[in-house]
């Protein structure tokens, strides 16, 4: 009798077994998906905040150490990547201070002004996802 059990010719899954697996996978997906929604915007906000508070801020401080002043508003943040040709031309430029263009995670350039309206040295900010409403702006002064 034991040999009869081993020689079962019905190999494969029944419809009930397949449906059970599909239901389990769907249940797991329904638990995980809501937790993942919205994470990409949180990640983009974190990257922008890191750029404002650390990456670009450090590059601006290095520029100032080398040249004695921050890039002017007209020179902009591109002065950190390419030596400015607009006056005042820095004589001790030792860059590039950044490797990539100063673009926020929403593919918009970071806004920069020096001297700043909110800080004496410079204002640095991103207009956020929608680029119009100040509700999602990220700044270096708050």
Image (cartoon, grey):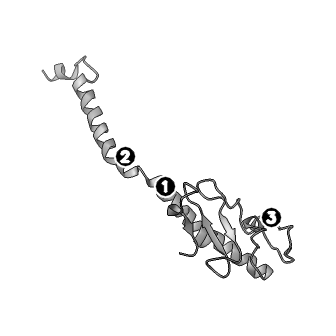
Category of crowding for the residue at label 3, using alpha-carbon neighbours closer than 10 angstroms: few (below 14), some (14–19), many (at least 20): some
Judge left or right: residue 14 versus residue 136.
left
Q: Quadrant location of residue 128? A: bottom right
Q: Is residue 87 left or right of residue 107?
A: right
Disc 1 packing (10 Å; few <14; some 14–19; many ≥20): few
Q: Quadrant of residue 87?
A: bottom right
Residue 40 image offset from top left, x and y in percent: 48, 53
Query: What residue lies at 53% left-to-right and 57% top-to-bottom?
Result: 44
Label 3 secondary element: loop
Picture residue at 21% right of the left edge, 23% below the top: 6
Q: CA distance from mark 1 to mark 3?
A: 30 Å
Q: Residue 104: x and y, percent?
A: 61, 59
Q: How many marks overall?
A: 3
Residue 86 in percent (x, y) is at 85, 68
> Mark 3 — residue?
82
Q: Position of residue 43 (x, y in %)?
A: 50, 58
- Direction from residue 53 to residue 23 in the image, left or right: left
> Which dot marks residue 41?
1
Q: Which residue is mark 2?
A: 33
Circle 2: element type: helix
Vertical position of residue 108 compared to residue 73: above or below: above
Marks 1,2: beta carbons within 8 A: no
């Amino acid at each position: 009798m034991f040999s009869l059990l081993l020689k079962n010719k019905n190999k494969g899954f029944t419809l009930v077994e397949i449906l059970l697996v599909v239901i389990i996978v769907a249940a797991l997906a329904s638990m995980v998906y809501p937790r993942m929604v919205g994470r990409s915007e949180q990640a983009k906000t974190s990257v922008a905040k890191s750029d404002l508070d650390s990456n670009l801020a450090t590059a601006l401080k290095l520029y100032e150490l080398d040249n004695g002043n921050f890039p002017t508003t007209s020179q902009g943040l591109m002065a950190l990547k390419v030596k400015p040709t607009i006056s005042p031309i820095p004589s001790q430029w030792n860059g590039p201070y950044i490797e990539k263009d100063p673009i926020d995670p929403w593919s918009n350039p970071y806004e920069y002004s020096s001297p700043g309206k909110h800080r004496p040295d410079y204002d640095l900010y991103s207009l956020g996802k929608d680029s119009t409403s100040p509700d999602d702006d990220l700044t270096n002064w708050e």
